[in-house]
Amino acid sequence: MKIKERYDVIVAGGGVAGVAAAVASARLGADTLLIERYGFLGGLGTAGLVNPFMSSYTSDGKPLIGGFYIELCERMRDLGGFKQRAFDPEAMKFACQEMALESGTHLLLHSIITGARMAGKEIAGVEVLTKSGTKNIDAKILIDCTGDADVAAMAHADYEFGDLANGLAQAMTLMFTIGNVDVRKSLIYAKENPEEMRFPKPASDEAVDRMMEGAVGIAGFFTKVEQAREIGEFPLDQDLVFYISLPTPG
Ligand SMILES: Cc1cc2nc3c(=O)[nH]c(=O)nc-3n(C[C@H](O)[C@H](O)[C@H](O)COP(=O)(O)OP(=O)(O)OC[C@H]3O[C@@H](n4cnc5c(N)ncnc54)[C@H](O)[C@@H]3O)c2cc1C
């Protein structure tokens, strides 16, 4: 695809916010370019494996978020990659790209925005390092969805970093995926050893069955963690193991 020198809208960053912004913009008829440094969309949900989506329902089950979010979840469900709030990152990559392309959004992947092009005090466009070299691309409107307001900072806009008291950023979580986990067996262990668990503490086999229908979050195994620590197999300063099941069995 040939990248033009000018668009109506440039969206910087292809995480869920960027995909939502680009899809909405293109569906309204604006000539829209979405620029993403990785070779796929989804941001922390795909590149960072952040999972599951935080709860977005009232306690009596009414949805608090609609629109793009519901559409994305339904597309991932159709791919067999969505269960309750947990999603398969590969399904998210596919669904985000499908939504972007169907909307008519132009995608520029493997491309990092390195600078903001200014016209006086306004952002006129961006400098982008692509596989074909550096390009200047302008737009009437630029939407910064880099997750960290990077383009706004490049344009010398005022910004704040971290918590205002100490300037500390949010603590990191290193997410990773493991397979061949018998989730039902873990829940049965939790049912039989509730004192070993932070959560859940299923009261019956029926409760285990109900939990298996959704995405399961399990935290605890206190004695096993302690035993592992004693033989040098658990060096972390934690008293529990916490994992969340994905839609793919095991
Ligand atoms: C440690 C941690 C744990 C979290 N846990 C959860 C959780 O359990 N559940 C939950 O729902 N949310 C969680 N969140 C929040 C969730 O990750 C964010 O709300 C969500 O990712 C925000 O989406 P976004 O599209 O705004 O940004 P991001 O997902 O950060 O996407 C930004 C995109 O912009 C791209 N980009 C950045 N700079 C440039 C550049 N210069 N040029 C080109 N591309 C660029 C990046 O590659 C990325 O794809 C967590 C966040 C963190 C940090």
Image: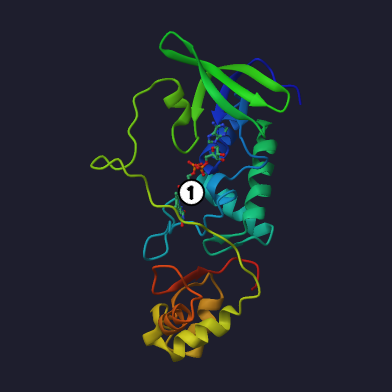
Q: Nearer the viewer, residue 19 or 194?
A: 194
Q: Which residue lies furthest to the top in this view?
A: 120
Residue 131 is at least partly visible in this image: yes
Q: Quadrant of residue 23?
A: top right
34 over 61 or under it: above or below: above
Q: Where is residue 220 in the image (x, y as percent from the top left)?
A: 42, 77
Residue 75 is at least partly visible in this image: no
Q: Position of residue 2 (x, y in %)?
A: 75, 22
Q: In which quarter of the image is residue 28?
A: top right
Q: Dot 1, crowdedness within 10 Å: few (<14), some or many (≥20)?
A: few
Question: Residue sitting at 56 percent across and 23 percent down?
Answer: 9
79 over 141 or under it: above or below: below
Q: Position of residue 249 (x, y in %)?
A: 65, 72
Quarter of the image for the C terminus: give it.
bottom right
Question: Residue sitting at 61 percent across and 68 percent down?
Answer: 178
Is 110 on the left or on the right of 228, as rendered? right
Q: Which residue lies furthest to the right in this view?
A: 1
Q: What is the secondary structure assignment of the residue under circle 1?
A: loop
72 over 246 or under it: above or below: above
Colouring used for the render: rainbow
Question: Residue sitting at 49 percent across and 81 percent down?
Answer: 231
The amino acid on which the numbered mark 1 sits, given as a three-letter code, is Gly
Question: Residue sitting at 42 percent across and 74 percent down?
Answer: 240
Quarter of the image for the N terminus: give it.
top right
Q: Nearer the viewer, residue 86 or 221?
A: 221
Residue bearing the label numbered 1 = 66
Q: Position of residue 129 (x, y in %)?
A: 64, 25
Looking at the image, how many numbered discs can be counted on the residues?
1
